[in-house]
Image (tube, helix red, strand yellow):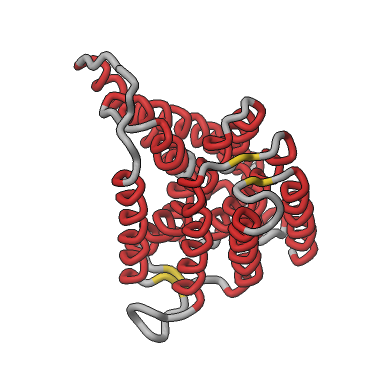
Amino acid sequence: MEFVSALALFFVGFFILIRGADYLVKGAVRLAQLFGVSPWFIGVVVVGIGTSIPELAITVASVFDGTDVGVGTVIGSDIFNLFIIGVSALLAPIVLQRAWTKDFALNALAVTAFGFFALFPILGDPNYFGITRPEGIALIVLSIAWIASLFRNTPPSLEVVERRVFAYVSATALTLAGLAAVFFGGNWVVEGAEVIALALGASPALVGLTVVGIGTSLPELIISVTAALRGQSGIAVGNLIGSNIFNALGVIGVAGALHPFLFNARFAPDLSVLVGASALLAVAVFFFGKRLTISRLEGTVFILTYVAYFVFTFWRG
């Protein structure tokens, strides 16, 4: 009976989580339009960060609960996002604008910074192998600096939007409702995942890396595939890169600042895969094949790499 209740809690929480993220993104995009921010900035920051809110909710709930679901979710989601780039490129080669290229390098640097803070005691207690509060704050500062640089280097929107008081109120209400939904849903997903993992003999870390990590990336998958088929390369890739950078800096940073947590050594191979794949993506964009293009061949390589990683993860248990 407890397993059935946990399963129901997990799926109800997940549904609320995804719907809440959808409302949050819609409200945030509307607010961005009302304040005259460019569509490119909306795609990378608003959509990218908006679709990472489920990971934020789950990770914060998880560290307070003392489980590994949250960290596993961040790593699993970021790796799966790179798989989504492969799927998008397989559907239609992704042609990038030069202004986007620095974000690929920043993505590799962001996940590397997360890895160093998680594996080595850099700031705070020299005997604490995890994310200390000073390290969490440092990651948050890096996240804010990244967003500020995007805002500073992005031209204002030329779109004319009718600005009424009701529009601001409705957009704000939609954003806040979405935020509340993802935090409640995130807590329920964590609680359900713990019981399910114990009942099935799987570790919370494995559940986070696979079921929850992939599940929280479904919004990115839908957005990217749709954008790729419509030839909107910026949105197809931008929301994924934005999501990955925010996961590594903002999500881990906020969780660590609120509640320092130890890093489970079993995640070291997964983190290595994430750093290596992120670096490979940056190298592919700059040096392999046609410059500033992610080809179908490169997309296939990322898909096969993820399949091999997924099989390895389940084999490892």
Residue pictured at 39% horizontal, 55% vertical: 250
316 versus 99 height, above or below = below
- The answer to whether residue 5 shows anywhere in this view is no
Judge from the rendering whether residue 308 lies leftward or rightward of residue 225; answer left or right. right
Q: Quadrant of the N terminus?
A: top right
Q: Quadrant of the C terminus?
A: bottom right
Q: Position of residue 253 (x, y in %)?
A: 38, 60
7 versus 31 height, above or below = below
Residue pictured at 54% horizontal, 62% vertical: 68
- Check the image and name the residue furthest to the left: 165
213 versus 179 height, above or below = below
- Check the image and name the residue furthest to the bottom: 127
Residue pictured at 55% horizontal, 32% vertical: 15
Figure quadrant of residue 198: bottom right
Q: Position of residue 67 (x, y in %)?
A: 52, 61
| Front position in the image: 192 or 116 | 116
- Check the image and name the residue furthest to the front: 290
Residue pictured at 52% horizontal, 48% vertical: 241
Figure quadrant of residue 91: top right
